Image (cartoon, coloured by chain):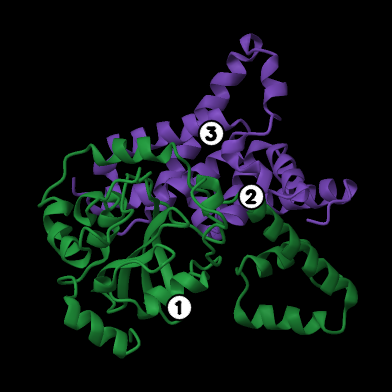
Amino acid sequence: MNAFDDETLMRWIDGELSRDESARLEAAALTDVDLAGRMQAVRRLRTAAREAFPATVDARDAHLARLISAGPVAGPSLFARFGQALADAFTPRLAVAWAGLATAAFIGGVLIGPMLGGGSDGLRVSAEGVLADRGLVRVLDSRLASEGPDGDGRGVGLTFQDGERHWCRTFQSHDHGMAGLACREDAGWTVRVLAPLGAAGGEVRTASSDTPEAILAAVDAAIAGQAADAAAEARAREAGWR
Amino acid sequence: MRLDDFQTGLVELLPRLRRFARVLRSRDADAQDLVQQTVERALAARTKFRTGTRLDSWTFTIMKRIAIDEGRSAQRWGRVVSPEDDSTARVPDASQADETLRADALAVREAIHALPDDQKHAVALVLVEGLSYGEAAEVLGVPAGTLTSRLVRGRQSLMQTLAAQGVTG
């Protein structure tokens, strides 16, 4: 009954046991109610600790992002590299809300919108970073940049492949008040970065000048080659982003 | 302005840096100061960052050092710290999105804050940040066995505290 001490159970839930050790422990738990209960307790504590300290975006990150970006760097500006492609992707009449600067936020298991005061329901993302917002997933799956935002203000901007040949797309969700970059992996559209959209103030803005720089920085870090043109984007969609 | 990989990585790390800081510092303003100091020191020390090193572990190490140095300093100056600090530490802070946390999660947060620093650091890196034991030991600059024993003691203490409070956590 005491063959498995607390440390072993903790190593198990932390993924520090070998596959054989884990299998032995899990097999023992099938016939040992007490052991199964102790395993459940260490699992609950781990979950509770993560829930107690969620990774959240914070308005003060904007200041820190500026501090970080103030250092000397080489190469052409992001706007110079991507500005024209974004301008091609969004005609001014369609570019409603690529505004503001922001805060980049890698997230996990976090409901994002309400913390920013930017949306009604928040943007749902699983703990693994997979986008779980069905409307936005549909937009990423099927919408072309040239079609502009849908009726709910969800649209896509740049489409490109990363170094591992995943298709990636920048997106905006006006309702959530967020812009972001997501890449199509086996599990679905995985969010690489999110940034809050600033207040559009009713003014029509151009995508090239108002895409949050944090998103452009993430594109720059991920992109292999050039952004897809309209034809390549359409072909990728037909191929199911594979 | 174009950001290089280091800068982009640091911007992307901000939510996790803040989360780690909030484990180390119960007051939101103190946690924010810790994040800012960490970012400043990381930028100043970037030439020491070697490609291939994990930026998160490297930055957590910086934050841990600052936190420990501050802790020692606070102990030395403890007599002049305003007594209201203890009461303000419990004031809910909207910027921490406390309103979205369940009461159980708040109890867990308080219980973690109440741990001795060495156990709290181990719990923060492994349970909250999801680092491996090896990575966490490196960040804390201790042997793996020491990390493990701190982690076990911290977790046993948390389970006892939370059980006593009737928190299912």
Seen from the viewer's position, the closer of residues A61 and A16 is: A61
Q: Which mark is residue B123?
A: 2
Q: Nearer the viewer, mark 2 or mark 3?
A: 3
Q: Quadrant of the C terminus of chain B?
A: bottom right
The residue that appears at 41% across and 40% down in the rendered structure is A61
Question: In the rendered image, is residue B66 in sight?
Answer: yes
The quarter of the displayed image where residue A36 is located: bottom right
What residue is pinned by disc 3?
Answer: B31
Chain where mark 2 sits:
B
Q: CA distance from mark 3 to mark 1?
A: 34 Å
Whether callout 3 and callout 1 share a subunit is answered no
Residue B168 position within the rendered picture, expressed as x and y whole percent measured from the top left:
83, 56
The quarter of the displayed image where residue B148 is located: bottom right
Residue A2 position within the rendered picture, expressed as x and y whole percent measured from the top left:
86, 70
Question: In the rendered image, is residue B50 in sight?
Answer: no
Counting other residues with Cα less than 10 Å from the Cα at mark 2, is it few (<14), some (14-19), or many (20 or more)? many
Q: Which mark is residue A188?
A: 1
Q: In the picture, which chain is green?
A: A
**Mark 3 belongs to which amino acid?**
Ala
Left or right of A229 on screen, residue A186: right
Seen from the viewer's position, the closer of residues B168 and A18 is: B168
**Mark 2 belongs to which amino acid?**
Val
Chain where mark 1 sits:
A
Q: CA distance from mark 1 to mark 2?
A: 31 Å
Q: Nearer the viewer, mark 1 or mark 2?
A: 1
Q: Nearer the viewer, mark 3 or mark 1?
A: 1
Q: In the picture, which chain is purple?
A: B
Counting other residues with Cα less than 10 Å from the Cα at mark 3, is it few (<14), some (14-19), or many (20 or more)? many
Chain where mark 3 sits:
B
Q: CA distance from mark 2 to mark 3?
A: 17 Å
